[in-house]
Image (cartoon, rainbow, N blue to C red):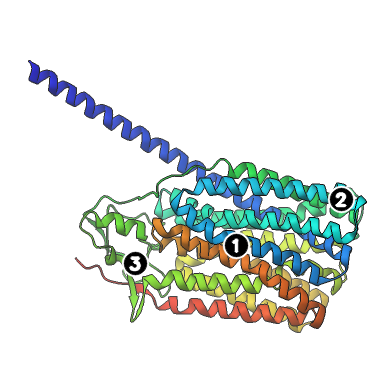
Amino acid sequence: KNGNIRAVHAATDGSMNRDDTISSETTASRQSSTNVRLGFLTTLLLSMRTSLSTAIDAYALLLLNGSFFIGLMEGTSGIAALAFTAAAGMLADRIGRSIVLRAAAISSILASAVLLWTIFYAKPQFTPMQVYVGLCCAAVLRGICQGMTIAPLEALFGDSIAVTGSRVQLYSFKGACNSIGLALGPITAVSIFLLTRSDTWTYPELSYVMAAAALVGVMLGLSLLLFRDVRPVRSLLVHHSTDTSCDIPTTTSIPPTSNCLAAPAAMAPGQLCDTTLDEAEADGEHNRPASACCCCCGSLRKSHVAPLVGLNFILTGFGSGMIYKFIPMFCWKELQLGPIATHAIIAGFQLLAVGGNILIARLARYCGPVAATIIFMSGACASLALIIAVTERSLVIAALVIRGALANSTAALLGSILNEHVSGRHRGKWNMVQQFGKVTWSGSAFASGALIDTIGYRQTFAFTLGFHTAATLALVPLLMVRPERTQK
């Protein structure tokens, strides 16, 4: 009788443990889904605030009448972001992503408060240089927020993706959110200029646009407070079955939308195998060596993917810093356009970039993500060369729109490639490299501001063309990477 009672208790305990496990898995799945949605929202708000900061640059140019001061302000912001990037990437892996994001939230709200104080309280009472210092303080706080946000956000977003087969689609949608946010900023600015019935670069209208940027900063801070850490999801990992399309042992067949791109037996160059290092390590617990999914071509292996993509991020970011913040000033000073037309151009190429993110994801299914990225980046470089060489205003405007659309369509796909080939425990560090690439544009803006005052806009943009061409060439070796046959 006692033996039967113990057996009943053991069965009851086992059932309760299984129920607890199912409940915890359900909670983790629900939080992962919430994190993915928050990732979309935060990406949109972060990019929207960035695009609204055009008004801050124009405000600084009105105050002190020099591109150098725009470069100095953006340079200080970039240095602040760079200083916090390394710490944020490492702390995200050690103490948790959500804790770092909460610190970034505080910085974002403080930046908004300082900006509002500067334009509505300090401007009527202090000298232009003192007001400029206030703008720089707000820019530093924005830089700290950006430095502490991107790497943990990218790592947590990668941790929260539950189905590996949808990785490219989710990252492409995230890239579309980034482009939508970058378009909503100038659309908001155009709306404000229309409501005030003014199409001139003057203090009152720019102040309203800056107030809108501060409001978006507060909303960004609140969204960052809602993230919660989750364990990296390892999906499709019940061992002992094989997907012959990639020669990689998997758990069950990978859906046709897999980032392996459902390639039939042989992959096209640049179609990197999509078995992530998280999956390789997890499957290694079931007698599959993690190296079984490595890609190779001669001495080039899958471990080289992340460094080459990281190099692309750094070169692209440094070159973008020499043009992005100065496109509105170029339209104002060189093309003699008002703020409505200038912001309409920026909104136009950002909206086209939304379609570009969808197009590049579809193109990646046929020629591979690397080849698709190279095609888009080459088109952006050709358009920039046209901007430099041509003086006809209509042609320059068309080239600006095309270049902006193509250049803003590649980051999401590159982020997907990077996160697929980095294990979960190192994802924060490698996303720190991605963030480093994004903050270098603020640092290079300092040099660009001085160069523009010395040699002009088009000559300075030639440096951007050189950096972006080098960034495109950095991806070419990845075209030779093919999946290595599985060692059984």
The dot on residue 83 is 1
Q: Disc 3 marks which residue?
A: 264
Q: Quadrant of the N terminus?
A: top left
Q: Which quarter of the figure has residue 73?
A: bottom right
Neighbor class of circle 2 (other Cα within 10 Å; few <14, some 14-19, many 20+) is some
How far separated are the C-alphas under marks 1 and 2?
A: 28 Å
* Residue 341 image position (x, y, % from top left): 83, 63
Q: Disc 2 marks which residue?
A: 122
Is 7 located above or below residue 238 in the figure? above
Q: Secondary structure at mark 1?
A: helix
* Residue 161 image position (x, y, % from top left): 44, 50
Q: Which quarter of the figure has residue 377?
A: bottom right
Of residue 23 and residue 203, the one placed in the foreground of this image is: 203
* Left or right: 15 as drawn, with respect to 197: left
Which residue appears at 44% of the width and 69% of the height? Answer: 306
Q: Earlier in the sequence, mark 1 or mark 2?
A: 1
Which residue appears at 89% of the width and 60% of the height? Answer: 128
The dot on residue 260 is none
